[in-house]
Amino acid sequence: MNRRTLLAGAASAAIVAANWPAIRLAQASETRRLAIATRVLEVNGKAAKVFGLTGPDGKPGLSFEAGGNFDIRLDNQLAEETMIHWHGLTPPAEYDGVPDLPMPIIKAGEQRNFRFPIGNGGTHWMHAHTLQEQQLLAAPLIVRTADDLKADEQEVVILLHDFSFTPPAELLAQLKAGKSSSGNMDANAMNHGGGTMNGMDMPRMDMSGGMAGMDLNDVNYDAYLANDRTLDDPEVVKVEKGGRVRLRIINGATATAFTIDLDSLGGSLIAVDGQPIVPVSGSQFPLSMGQRADIRLDLPKEGGAFPVLALREGGNERTGVVLASSGAPVSRLAVVGDAAGPILDLSLEATLQALQPLSQKPADKNFMVHLSGNMDGYTWAMGGDHLNIRPRSRLAITMMNMSMMAHPMHLHGHHFQVVAIGGKSISGAVRDTVLVPPNQTVTFAFEAVNPAKAWAFHCHHLYHMASGMMTTVNYEGA
């Protein structure tokens, strides 16, 4: 599958799953309108024209109750074509939201209906599956269970993003021209020549310098946002003294990983990518692009103001919101902290345990996927096995990162369970996006229960995806 087809649109693909049971919808639902429109933010004292997704209540995003229908009329009010992906949901492929895989891209001024079962609860999001994602074309998509609705806790949704006044196509062109703004790019660490695998060029790894050549950020952004605001003018959320809060945090950034920092308040991580886990207590939680974290907080009875910060990986920049009880003074927070944000690794991932694990039976088929990159020309690739799968089988995919950048890997249409890190078996979290750091391997397993001709499988770093780190998982006979 050509990456330009996946990103921008080309010939439409047919999808039919032969003899597969029909999708069952809930008996009744109300079609809601979701508008794709332009809006203006103030960022660093300047007006910024961006995009947005607004529900019928005029607020960004949508929320649903588990077990109902996702039933919307998407209204593209932009002067350009686009496509929206429902990240975290598992719809039939024709509604997944990747241009021409198989649904054609949505033209300017066009309206289109989407209706399918919403599934279980979870913190999800929706975003453009084009470079428009960089222009903030994203919003929360929250599905609440009956227990969520009954819980005696306040819900706070936080959507993180990285922002640039430079158009995304120009940012990508600069990267391809070797004009990274990060200051820590090491082309030599990424390009060591030689080797092919299944007809695809594969660079050799040179680890003689340890991780010194690792590239954390290849774009320096003008601002980092939490719910569209910078930390020098953050959203202040009123909370009750001694109350319980559930944070639903979404990393909607296109090329920036964060660490969520709760400082002395601490909290309990209770779900990742919308899937419940055995709770993990802590004050810092890593969050790569596309991932979500649900964190439960118990506020002190005396109240106060409590920043919830997102620390940029390897940089001093930060963003976030402030939780404040009535009458609590809110101190000014600097957008640049005293120390660089932690480098994300898999130490927490290796400890996570799903509350609702997938089948534990051995995989019917195992695949190997190689993640590679070359900074000369800024090209990225996914090599190795062809991902052809049989319906109703259990599959395992091992991803080997042969590049010097981390890759948050996202599989459409399915939830998977992390079952090995570095070759060591675990019974990990159920996710849809997992980080694969440089020179490491991660294995996930999933059930082939959502048939389609092809499902997108890609890195959730927007510019890696746009430059080749995207492939498809294909159902045989679909």
Image (cartoon, rainbow, N blue to C red):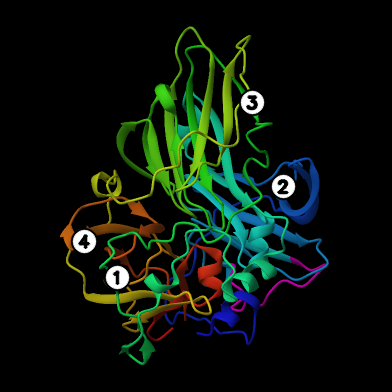
Residue range in magenta is: 97-111
Mark toward the start of the polypeptide (2 vs 4):
2
Cα separation between marks 1 and 3: 42 Å
Quick one: which residue is furthest to the top in this view? 302
Check disc 1 and give the amino acid type: Met
Mark 1 vs 3, N-terminal side: 3
The residue carrying mark 2 is: 55
* Closer to viewer: mark 1 or mark 2: 1
Q: Which residue is mark 4?
A: 422
**Secondary structure type for disc 2:** loop
Q: Are marks 2 and 4 in contact (CB under 8 Å)?
A: no
How much space separates mark 3 and mark 4, taking CA atoms? 41 Å
**42 shown above or below 14:** above
- Of helix, strand and loop, which one carries label 3? strand
* Residue 236: numbered disc: 3
Disc tally is 4
Query: Looking at this view, is 6 or 210 the one in front?
Result: 210
Is label 2 or label 4 in front? Answer: 4
Give the crowd class for mark 3: few <14, some 14-19, many >=20 residues within 10 Å: some
**Horizontal relation, residue 315 to residue 387: left or right:** right
Between discs 1 and 2, the one toward the N terminus: 2
Residue 211 picture location, percent across and down: 31, 59
Residue at image coords 45%, 37%: 339
Residue at the bottom extreme, as displayed: 199
Q: Does 104 lie within the magenta span? A: yes
Label 3 amino acid?
Val
Q: Mostly what secondary structure, the magenta segment?
A: loop
| Tag 4: amino acid | Gly
x, y percentage for residue 256? Answer: 52, 53
The image's mark for residue 400 is 1
- The spot of residue 262 in percent (x, y) is 44, 29
